[in-house]
Amino acid sequence: MCAAPVTGALALAVSISVQAQAADVPLEKLKLPDGFKIELYADDVPNARHMARGDKGTLFVGSRRAGKVYAVVDTDGDHKADEVKVVAEGLKMPTGVAFKDGDLYVSAVTSILRLDDIESNLDNPPKPVTITDQFPDKHHGWKYIAFGPDGWLYVPIGAPCNICEEKDYANIQRLKIEGDKVAKTETWAEGVRNTVGFTWHPQTKHLWFTDNGRDMLGDDIPPCELNTAPVAGKHFGYPYCHGNDIVDPEFGEGKQCSAYVAPVQELGPHVAPLGVKFYTGDQFPAEYKNQVLIAEHGSWNRSKKIGYRVTLVTLDDEGNATSYEPFIDGWLQGEEAWGRPVDVLVMPDGALLVSDDKAGVIYRVSYEG
C-alpha cells in the first residue's frame, strides 16, 4: 500500500476573495418548506465536499477532485463568508475533515493526516503529520471521517468494487489515536458497502450512517439506506442482502436477509446519500429537533435521474422512521442537475449549512417563520 502524496508546499495558504467571484447559482429554483430561506454562505469553494467546524468558528471543507482543503472564514459574523483560504493542496481525494483539540484531521485515501493548531495558522498552515498511511487505494477509497463521542476517529473502508466479497472491506472502523500514531484499530460495523456520511444521535450517542446501494440491478433496486449501529459487531447485509429483504442475485444464494441488520429507512434507489446529521439547533420549528437530514448527491446510472436534494427522515421516540420526504429540492431540473448536495452541518445559531461539489458553493438555510 502506498501513502497518498503530500505535495503543494503547504507553507502558504492561498486566499480567495469571495466577493470578487460571484457564482451563477439559481437559488430561486430551490424549494423549501414555508418559512425557510436559503442563501449563499460561500460562493467559491471548488468541489466542496465534507465540512467540519473549528472551535474558533472556521469552517473547514474537504474536496475530492480538487485535491484541496479549504478554510472558510466569516470574519464579521454576518453569516456570509468573507474569505476562503486553501490550507492544504496536492492531496489525493481529501474528502473527509474532522476537528479535535485544535487540530484538523484529513482523509486522503490511503492516509489520515493532521494539521496541528490549524486555526492559529490559517495563513501559514503547518506541514501535515501522517497519522497512518495504511488504508487501501481501491475503488470507494475516498472517506468521510468523524470523531465519535468516545473520542475515537471513525473511518469507513468502502467495497473495492460495485459488488464483490472481499475480506477486510465494506466496513466502518474506529481508530484510537495517541500522539502521532494509531494505538488501536477496531471494526465497528460490517456489511456496509460504501458509507460517505455518519453521525451520532444527540441523546443516545448511537452511530447512524448512510449507505450507498449497489449498481446494475436496474432503475428501482436496491434502495440506498439509513442505518444505525448502536453497538459494535453488527452486519448490515452487503454483499448478500440489500434494503429490508432484497437477496443479491450474485452473492445472496442461501442467505436470509433476516440474519442481517435491516435499515432504519430505505432511501430512494441510487439517490447516493452522503452527509447526514441530526438537527440539534433551536432555530427551526420544534418538530425538526433531533430529526435526520440527509444530503442526497443524486443518481449517476439511472435512466431517469433522482436525488439531488436534501431529505428529512422523521423518527419517533423509539428511533423508528415515520416519514421520508424532501426538505430542499430543485437542484435537478428535468434531467439536468445544476448542483449536487454533499454534506450538511448544523451551526451554533441553528442554521444549516449544505455543501455542493458541482456548484462549488456552501449554502446557509435559516428559518424566518
Image: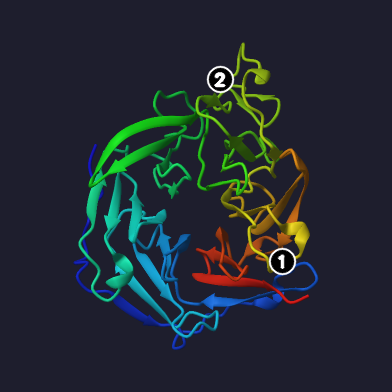
Q: Is residue 56 above or below residue 148?
A: below
Numbered mark located on residue 284 in the image:
1
Nearer-N-terminus badge (2/1): 2
Extreme-bottom residue of the structure: 20
Query: Badge 2 is on which residue?
Result: 251
Q: Is residue 345 above or below residue 207?
A: below
Q: Residue at x 66, y 16 (%)?
A: 256
| Quadrant where the image shows the N terminus | top left
Closer to the camera, 250 or 69? Answer: 69
Residue 28, by quadrant, is bottom right
Q: Residue at x 50, y 77 (%)?
A: 43
Q: Is residue 317 above or below residue 16?
A: above
Closer to the camera, 188 or 134? Answer: 188
| Quadrant where the image shows the C terminus | bottom right
Q: Nearer the viewer, mark 2 or mark 1?
A: 1
At label 1, the amino acid type is: Phe
Closer to the camera, 124 or 16? Answer: 124
Left/right of residue 301 with respect to residue 320 in the rendered view: left
Numbered mark located on residue 209 in the image:
none
Extreme-top residue of the structure: 254
Few, some or many residues within 10 Å of mark 1 (<14, 14–19, 20+): many
